Amino acid sequence: MQVVDIRAAMARIDAFLKLGLAQGCSDVHLAVGVPPMLRMNGDLMPIKFRDLADHELNNYVAEILTQSQQAAFDEGNDLDFSYVTEDGGRFRVNLFRKDTGVGAVFRSIPSEIPTLESLDLPPVIETFLDHHQGMVLVTGSTGTGKSTTLAAMINHLNMTRNLNIISLEDPIEFVHPSRKAQVIQRELNTHVKSFAGGVRAAMREDPDVILVGEMRDTETISMAMTAAETGHLVLGTLHTTSAVKTIDRVIDALPGELRELTKGFLSQSLYAVITQVLVKTPGGQGRRGIQEILVNTKAVANLILTDQTHQINAQIQTGMDVGMQTMDQALLAAIEKRQVDPDDAFRYAADKRKIQRYVPDTSILPKLDMARG
């Protein structure tokens, strides 16, 4: 993806992005037929502006696209790219067409690279980065802060170890100047044609660490596994919502004849799975990452090998001594420390009974209970 940096004249779309940054929003949504909207602490809120017309938004978007991007968009392709405003604000952009016309989502990328400490991530995550080969997966739905957590992990390695770090991203978000490590950032469709091809190329570039921005297909997962088995630390992401689902997703992604090999790889080379959600803080003025953490112990490895992944959650529940925690355990701990809003935490809990007594808004309880039934 190509970084677009408009300097000659301020693009009109920058005014909406500047407003979004001033308000502290995570995303700016632009779509035909509705006013511009801001994602504020998880909620989508319209700004005081007229409904956007098709020709109007098309003109706004045209001001920030290169000729090749405009041609690709005119051919009916969605676009993913980075955009830097005149004021230096950096955004990840998804541009698309829908039934009423053009739509675009601008995800704000903070200028300051996060640290493990600033995100208050569980201390065990730092230990995952001490390994010299194997795989660590960061998972969760879209918009749950996976990129931010990975950026903090890369930043830690960059500041503490003499490594060659190669990241494959779609698009590049946080920009990492090389410090103690050398950080090489490559962008899908700008520097590499595919994640799988990028991993294959990276393995010939003397890497110590390879970040795979999204393990979205069988070939990419297979290449990432190969890299992890051949002396590299691989950090990857999947759009899965629990540790158990992540392991099942990797096993199911490979052809049936490779199932045993995949289980063998996971049992030996997978170090950990970090699954994340973003939960509102008390008062709703921010959001905090809450993590489920699976550490691949001998007991977990045996469950993977014997097709008993459904029992892994019990191992997580009893594995706090090695840094494991279920999502429910993490949510409950955050509630008790008054780090998150109980009403919002309740929505992410698997066993809602454990959190129900902390919920002040009792009106949401029967509604969600009926939805479960």
Image (tube, rainbow, N blue to C red):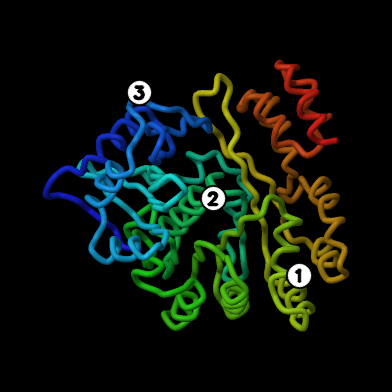
Q: Where residue 333 sits: x, y (%)?
A: 71, 32
The 10 Å Cα crowd at callout 3, few under 14, some 14 to 19, many 20 or more, is few
Q: Which residue is mark 1?
A: 267
Q: Secondary structure at mark 2?
A: helix
Q: Which residue is mark 2?
A: 146
Residue type at tag 2: Lys
Q: Name the residue nearer the viewer: 318 or 79.
A: 79
The 10 Å Cα crowd at callout 2, few under 14, some 14 to 19, many 20 or more, is many
Q: Tell me what residue is drawn at x 77 percent, y 73 percent.
A: 263
Left or right for 285, reference 47: right
- Distance from disc 1 to disc 2, alpha carbons, whole Å, reads 24 Å
Q: Tell me what residue is drawn at x 59 percent, y 80 percent.
A: 230
Residue type at tag 1: Ser
- Distance from disc 2 to disc 3, alpha carbons, whole Å, reads 31 Å
Q: Compared with residue 323, is residue 258 higher up or lower down, i.e. above or below?
A: below
The N terminus lies in quadrant: bottom left
Q: Compared with residue 84, is residue 346 higher up or lower down, i.e. above or below?
A: above
